[in-house]
Image (cartoon, helix red, strand yellow):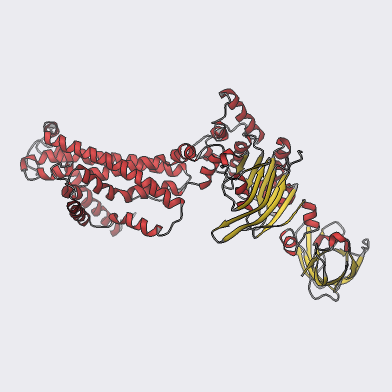
Amino acid sequence: MKRSPLALFAGLYLIFLYAPIILLPLFAFNDGTIIAFPLRGFTLGWFADLANTPALHEATLNSLIIACSVAVLATCLGLFAARAVTRYKFPLKGGILGFIMLPLVLPEVIVAISLLVVLMQLGINASIFTIILGHTLLCMPFAIAILQGSFAGLDVSLEEAAVDLGETRAGAFRLVILPIVTPGIIASLLICFIISLDEFIIAFFLSGNEPTLPVYLWGQLRFPARLPVVMALGTILVTLSIVLLIVADIFRRRGLRRTGQSETGGFL
Amino acid sequence: MSSTPLIQMQDVHKYYGAYHALRGITAEIAEGEFFSLLGPSGCGKTTLLRAIAGFEEISSGAILLNGADMAGVPPNRRPTNMVFQSYAIFPHLSVEQNVGFGLRRSSMSVGEKTQAIGEALEMVGLGHLGGRAAHALSGGQRQRVALARALILKPKVLLLDEPLSALDRKMREDMQVELMKLQREVGITFVLVTHDQEEALVMSDRIAVMFEGEIAQLADPEVLYRRPATKRVADFIGVMNFLPATASGRSVEAAGLGVADLAADQMPAGPVAGACTVGLRPETLSILHDGEASMAREASAEIEEVVYYGDMTYYDVRLDGMDTTMRISMRNMVGRDVLDVGARTRVGWDPRAMVVFPD
C-alpha cells in the first residue's frame, strides 16, 4: 500500500495532539522532581503525596459537588428542552434553541467575564453555587444535543398507545418514554459531569476562595517541586475522563439502537 | 345485535384553528360491524378515528359509545383500543410484555395474565414468539403484536389506523383475509381507516367514503361500487367511464349509447333535467367477439388502445358517434383473441349498469 502524504500528516497531527498527554503519566511515575529526560526510575510516591494534601481534598470535594450538581441540573433542563423541541411546534423554536446552543461557540473567557460582571452587579459572591450556574450554562448544549437524539427517534404514538392501553399520561411517560430515553439520560449525565470536572476558565473566574481541581492544579504550577504531584493528579483526571467518555458513548449508542436509529457518528 | 348502535356520531365538527377538519359527521355503527372510513389523505378519516379513541377533542357535536357521551372522557377510560399505523410496539419490552401491557392495571392474577397473553398471541398466530424482543420482529409480526395487545383488553371497539399500509402487497392481501376472520371470531366491532378502496371493499360490512371532512356516501361495498352517489365517489372507488348525457325524467340519452329508460336507483337523489353524466364500469361493457352472445344494447366501435395484463385486457374504444373513448376490461379466455389497435368490433352493454350523476 502506498503511503500518501495525507496519512503522514494525519500521523504527525495525532502525535502532536496526544504526545503531551502521554508524557503526563510518564513523569507521574518518574522518581525525580525535575520534568526532563532521562527518566530516573519508577515510583508511586507522587500519588501517595496526593493523599497527604488537605487542600487538594477540599478542591476535589468542591469539584465533585459542582460536577454532580451540574450533571443533574443540565440533564434535567436538557430533558425538558429536548422533549419540547422534538414534540411540539412553537414560535421562535429555532431562535430559542440557537440561544441555548450559543455557549458552544462563544469564547469561554468572554462567558466567564460576563458572568462575573453580572454576578457582581447582582451582589452575589463567587462561590461553588456560581460555578454550578456557569457550568450548567456551558453543559446545556451538550445535554440537549445528546437527549435530542434520544427523543428524535421516539414515535409519538408510543405514548398514545400506552394511554390507549389504560395508562395515565404520567404512567405512559414513566413506563414507556423514560425507559427508552434512559441511555441518553445516563450519557448526558456522564458527559456533563466530565465537562464540569475538567472546566477551568469559568471555575477560575467564579471560584472565589473555593477552588475546583483544575483551579487548584493551576495554583500548584507556581511551585516547581510540586510539579510531579500535579502530573500524578493530571494522570488520574485524564484516565477518569476517558473512561467516563467511553461509558457515556456506549450508553448513547444503546439508546439509539433501542429507538431503532442508525449510528450517525459521535455526538461531538 | 342490540337495538341502540354501539357508536353514534352526531353532527361532529372539528376545527384546527381556522381549518375545518370534520364538517358535520353523522353516522351510526352497529355492534359487531366491520366499518371502514375510506378517503384520500387529508379527508379527516384519521381525525375522526382519533376522536372516537379520545386523542382528539371534537369542537362540536357528540360521539356516543354504548349510549354514553364520550365528551371529556380520556382515551384510557374509553372502551376502545387502537392499532396504530406505525404499530407503536414498545421497543424496550418483549413481545409478551407488549401484549400484557394493558393488563398492568387489571385485577387478574399472574397466572391468569400469562394465560390471557398466551391466548392473545395464539389468536394472531404468534404463539411461539412470546419471549422475543420487540425490535427483532418483522413488519407483519409487529402488526400481529399490535393486534394482540389491543384485543387482549376485549374492547367494545377496535380502531385500526391504516394497519396494512406498511406491508408489502402479498402480505397485505393475506392480512386482509386474516383480519376479517379474526373480526368474525372475536365479534368485536372494528373501525378501519384506509385510503385503499380495494382493502375497504374486501373487508368491510359498511364503508363511509369521506372527502374534505364530510361523508360523501355511507353504504355497503356492493352498493358503493354499483351505485356510487357522486362522480367523485365513483372515481375514487374503482374505474368508471363518464359520458356526457341529457336527461328528461328517467329517460337518459348519451351520444353513442342512445336513449335508455333507467330505474329510480340509477338516478341521482335530486331531480335531473338537461345536462348530466352517465357512468359505466369497464367490466359492464363487453367486446362482442364473433359468435359470442349478444347483449341488451350493441354498437359498432373502433379500438384505440390495448393494454394487456395477463389475466385481463383493457381496451380503450370509441363507439361510433361518440367524442370520447371508453375503457372496457375483458377477461382473457381460451379462444378469445386479444384485438389490435385500430380493429373494428362490436361493443355490448346493459343499461341496468348505468348510473346517472348530476352535472
- Indicate the position of residue A222 as horizontal and vertical percent values: 7, 45
- Indicate the position of residue B322 as horizontal and vertical percent values: 83, 75
- Indicate the position of residue A75 as horizontal and vertical percent values: 34, 44
Up the image or down, B312 lies above or below A189; here it is below
* Quadrant showing the N terminus of chain B: top right
Up the image or down, A70 lies above or below B217; here it is above
Which residue shows up at 16% across the image and 40% down it?
A: A26
Up the image or down, B230 lies above or below B135; here it is below
Q: Is residue A86 left or right of residue A102?
A: right
- Indicate the position of residue A16 as horizontal and vertical percent values: 21, 52
Which residue shows up at 15% across the image and 41% down it?
A: A210
| Camera sees residue B89 | no
Nearest the viewer among A205 and B170 is A205
* Quadrant showing the C terminus of chain B: bottom right
Nearest the viewer among B76 and B95 is B76
Q: Is residue B213 left or right of residue B251?
A: left
| Camera sees residue B120 | yes
Occupied quadrant, residue A211: top left
Occupied quadrant, residue A228: top left
